[in-house]
Image (cartoon, rainbow, N blue to C red):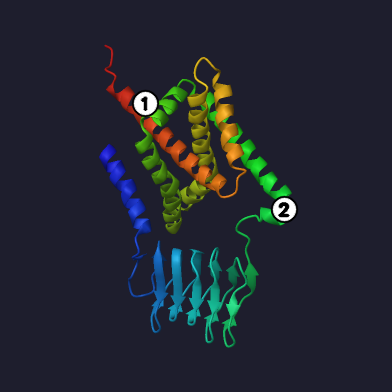
Amino acid sequence: MRRSLTISLLSLILLAMATPAWAQDAGGEEAFVVLSGQADVPAGQQVGDLVVFHGSSTVDGTVDGSLTAFDAPVTISGRVNGDVVVFNGRVELRSGANVTGDVVSQDAPMVASGATIGGTTRQVQTNPSWDRFGWAGRFAFWLAVSVSTLVVGLALLWLVGRGAARILEAGRTRIGPSIGWGLLAFFGLPILAILALVTVVGIPLGLGLLAALGLIYALGYGATAWILGRSILRTPTAWVLAFLLGWAILRLVALIPVLGGIVWFAAVVFGLGALLVAIWRARTAVQATPAVS
């Protein structure tokens, strides 16, 4: 079971990072889904709904449905019989392009003379711009993250109780596996959520998983704060003081531009991995315990 789980998760990551696209090609009018790479529709060809998660999209032919891009520039010189929604990336409508629906993008689209849009042009704000509020906005964001990670970290350690020792042991003795499993979880969970959104039955799972990513990452951050703090303040110092020390160090480093982001990523990855390793060790220990008759 362990080997099957590992192979499945690794396959998921490799699938998402691979350049070739995954598509349904039955008569040329099925949904065309690209996880990473080029989502091109050549002139004279027609596809159904077009979805690209990461890469680029060039439409010289016809998209008989909506075109949705999450992280990809979109260039259209053909026809889209529906809406064009781009969350992150440039949208360019060349001469002769025809979009029958709306064009929704983060930045204003570049529309050449001769291109037509049947609906409206709207802009979507995918993330709050804290910088426009100056230092007060950046401090407010830092404070919000600090409070969230503090509450989540304390709740985690209080709920696991003696299990906190397993998290600490995993972080100290299983550094390599913790990093590996942490990277797998950090990148694999969003990919799993996106894959679930592609299918109708998986939409609730995908939406729920995307909504829970912030909490999951906060759990990893809190686990790293605990490992760091307890490595400095050892027993018999109270676990609360040890966690607060590790959390304070991480939050002070977060005030440093660039370095703060790198440390946040490393803390989340390492903490998630340590949690997974600790959970796996606990389960295997329970399974290995012989039953008392």
Q: Nearer the viewer, residue 158 or 116?
A: 158
x, y percent for residue 255: 62, 43
- Circles 2 and 1: CB distance less than 8 Å? no
Evaluate whether residue 49 shows in this view. no
Q: Nearer the viewer, residue 46 or 128?
A: 128
Q: Name the residue under label 2.
A: 134
Evaluate whether residue 13 shows in this view. yes
Q: Residue at x 27, y 42 (%)?
A: 4
Q: Which of 269 and 135 is in front in this view?
A: 135
Q: Which residue is drawn at 71% across and 49% down?
A: 135
Q: Is residue 237 left or right of residue 180?
A: right
Mark 2: which secondary structure? helix
x, y percent for residue 290: 26, 17
Does residue 27 lie above or below 218 as drawn?
below
Mark 1: which secondary structure? helix
Which of the 4 image quarters holds residue 253? top right
**Mark 2 Cα within 10 Å, few/some/many (few <14, many 20+)?**
few
x, y percent for residue 43: 40, 83
**Front disc: 2 or 1:** 2
Q: How many marks?
A: 2
Please give the label number shown on residue 161.
Answer: none
Q: Mark 1 points at which residue?
A: 282
Where, quadrant-wise, is the N terminus in this rendering?
top left
Which of the 4 image quarters holds residue 154? top right
x, y percent for residue 116: 58, 83
Q: Which of 199 and 239 is in front in this view?
A: 239
Q: Residue at x 28, y 22 (%)?
A: 288
Does residue 244 lie above or below 251 as drawn?
above
What separation in Å lies between label 2 and label 1 (alpha carbons)? Answer: 47 Å
In the picture as drawn, the residue positioned furthest to the top comes out as: 293
Where, quadrant-wise, is the C terminus in this rendering?
top left
- Amino acid, disc 2: Gly
